[in-house]
């Protein structure tokens, strides 16, 4: 995909998300919704990397995530990814809903140096598609920070949102994806 085609795809994704929220299918009052804010699309923040799965004996291991309300959410930890970020290689834990043996998408909650400054203080989320063309348990995962988004609890009370585990706190400033206005 060319840079201009990539940028157009990211902008289209964002436009459709804004339309979804404006139609009242999001956490905000549609009458007051004026659109979300984003960092400019930058393909340098998009990676296709190998999902390093857990050993077979630990596959789908339960992992408890804290939430903004003090409750907990249990998910399956499916592995981790190594990302070549500008300030060095970083590792993020990767999750899926419990009971999904072969998920099509994985969940990657993270915090970074922008958290509490230009992005929501508790962190952001990525829903990353898996490509299982490798065969067996191997998979590639598309980690595109341009699609990073704030959890619903960033927009108001009444939402329970999982918090990124300490292992997913990045020292880097990820200047991609959704940002505060």
Image: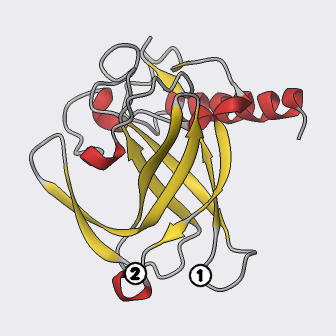
Instruction: Give neighbour class at mark 2: few <14, some 14-19, many 20+ (Cα, 10 Å).
Output: some
Q: Is residue 104 above or below residue 86?
A: below
Residue 137: image tag? 1
Is 23 situated left or right of 121 in this image?
Answer: right
The residue where tag 2 is placed is: 59
Q: Are marks 2 and 1 in contact (CB under 8 Å)?
A: yes
Residue 133: x and y in percent read 75, 75
Q: Which residue corresponds to the image point at 62% horizontal and 58% vertical from the top-left?
A: 129
Q: Is residue 49 visible?
A: yes
Residue beneath the point at 67% across and 39% down: 46
Nearest the eye: 123 or 172: 172
In the image as oriented, which residue stretches furthest toward the left?
70
| Residue toward you, 67 or 42 | 42
Judged left or right of residue 74, residue 47 is right
Q: Nearer the viewer, residue 32 or 136?
A: 136
- Where residue 98 appears, as percent x and y from the top left, is 34, 74
Numbered disc 2: secondary structure: loop
- Classify 97 as above or below 173: below
Q: Is residue 38 above or below residue 92?
A: above
């Amino acid at each position: 995909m060319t840079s201009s085609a990539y940028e157009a795809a990211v902008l289209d994704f964002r436009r459709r998300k804004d339309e979804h929220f404006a139609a009242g299918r999001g956490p905000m009052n549609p009458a007051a919704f004026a659109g979300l804010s984003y960092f400019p699309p930058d393909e340098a923040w998009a990676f296709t990397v190998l999902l390093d799965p857990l050993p077979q004996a630990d596959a789908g291991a339960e992992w408890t995530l804290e939430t903004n309300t003090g409750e907990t959410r249990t998910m399956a930890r499916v592995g981790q990814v190594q990302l070549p970020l500008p300030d060095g290689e970083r590792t993020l834990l990767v999750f899926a809903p419990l009971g999904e043996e072969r998920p099509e998408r994985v969940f990657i909650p993270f915090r970074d140096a922008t958290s509490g400054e230009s992005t929501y203080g508790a962190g952001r989320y990525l829903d990353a598609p898996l490509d299982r063309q490798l065969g067996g348990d191997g998979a590639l995962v598309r980690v595109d920070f341009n699609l990073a988004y704030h959890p619903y609890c960033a927009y108001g009370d009444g939402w329970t949102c999982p918090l990124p585990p300490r292992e997913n706190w990045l020292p880097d400033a990820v200047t991609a994806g959704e940002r505060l206005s």
